[in-house]
Structures are given as C-alpha cells and as structure tokens.
Amino acid sequence: MGEEELISYCGLYCGDCFGYHGKIASLADELNTELKEINFKKNADFFAEIPVFKAFKNYDSFVELLETLKELKCEGCRTGDGPPFCEIRKCCGEKGIMGCWECDEFKDYTELKECEKLQFLKTHGDGHIKNLVILRDRGVEEFIKGDRNW
C-alpha cells in the first residue's frame, strides 16, 4: 500500500499505528500459544495459592486479554479494515471525499473538535485533529513528509 493510502479518513497515519504493524497482536498470539502448549494454567492455579503470587488468580482474565490483543491488527481503513463501526469512513464515503480535511463543514480547528464522528478517537487526544489541519493547510505530500501526531 502506498503512503497516501495509509492516511486514514480521520487524519491518522496507519503507518504510525501499532495495529498496522501487528507486533502486539503477534506477540500476544505467540505468548498465548506458548502458554497453552505447556499447559501453564495448572501452574497458574498452583501459584495462585501462594500469597506472593496471588495475581495468578487473574490468569483466566489474562488469557482473555491475550485473545483480545491478538485482534489488534489492522491493514488500514482504506482497505476496508479498521473499526467496523467507524462513522468517519461512512461519512467520507457518502460525501465522496478522501478524508475529513476535505469536508466543507470543516472551517477551523474548533469545528473539527466538535464533530461527533471524531469523538471516539479520544485515545489520540487531539492528534488526529491537528493532522487534519496539516492535511487541509499543507496537503497530503507535506503531511507524509512532515511530523505527524498520534
């Protein structure tokens, strides 16, 4: 996939994302596989009875977390991947625009911050909004070359 295609509709750059690189998902899968192969559950149950290792009582939750972490991989929203509930992708598709930076309703930073569709990206603070401003003001090529926010 080309660098331009790695710019998500919301202004994040997929190439900067842990999900795109898949390392966390891969490591979680590797650890989970290893723990199953050696039947670590029986060890965890044993360790859980020792006061200093009481955290092993949460082993089942840990395995559930590993299973979830295995899903933290994404090929980018332009490939149709990414959160299936993403309203931003849907909105941009309906408007026929490449991303929020091309939206007629986006006149300034404040309007973007108030867009309800962008609210689910809270873990990025306002990084995606800063990126959208860069994309709008400087263009895609400069955005790819420059410093991006995550």
Image (cartoon, rainbow, N blue to C red):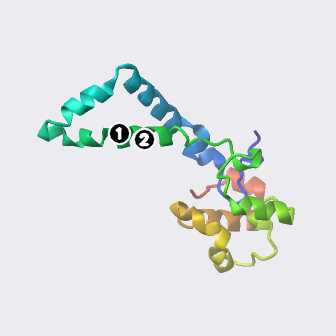
Image spot of residue 107 (x, y percent) = 75, 78
Considering only vertical position in the picture, is 84 above or below 113? above
Outermost residue to the right: 96
Q: Residues within 10 Å of mark 1 (few under 14, many from 20)?
A: few
Check disc 2 and give the amino acid type.
Glu
Q: Secondary structure at mark 2?
A: helix
Quadrant of the image containing the C terminus:
bottom right
Q: Residue at x 62, y 75 (%)?
A: 113
Image spot of residue 30 (x, y percent) = 46, 27
Going by the image, does 48 lie left or right of 138? left
Q: Nearer the viewer, residue 148 or 16?
A: 16
Disc 2 target residue: 64
Q: Nearer the viewer, residue 41 or 124?
A: 41
Check disc 1 and give the amino acid type.
Asp
Q: Residue at x 19, y 42 (%)?
A: 54
Q: Quadrant of residue 12?
A: bottom right
Q: Quadrant of residue 50?
A: top left
Going by the image, does 135 lie left or right of 26? right
Q: Secondary structure at mark 1?
A: helix
Image spot of residue 17 (x, y percent) = 58, 47
The answer to whether mark 2 and mark 1 are in CB contact below 8 A is: yes
In the drawing, what numbered circle is on residue 60?
1
Quadrant of the image containing the N terminus:
top right
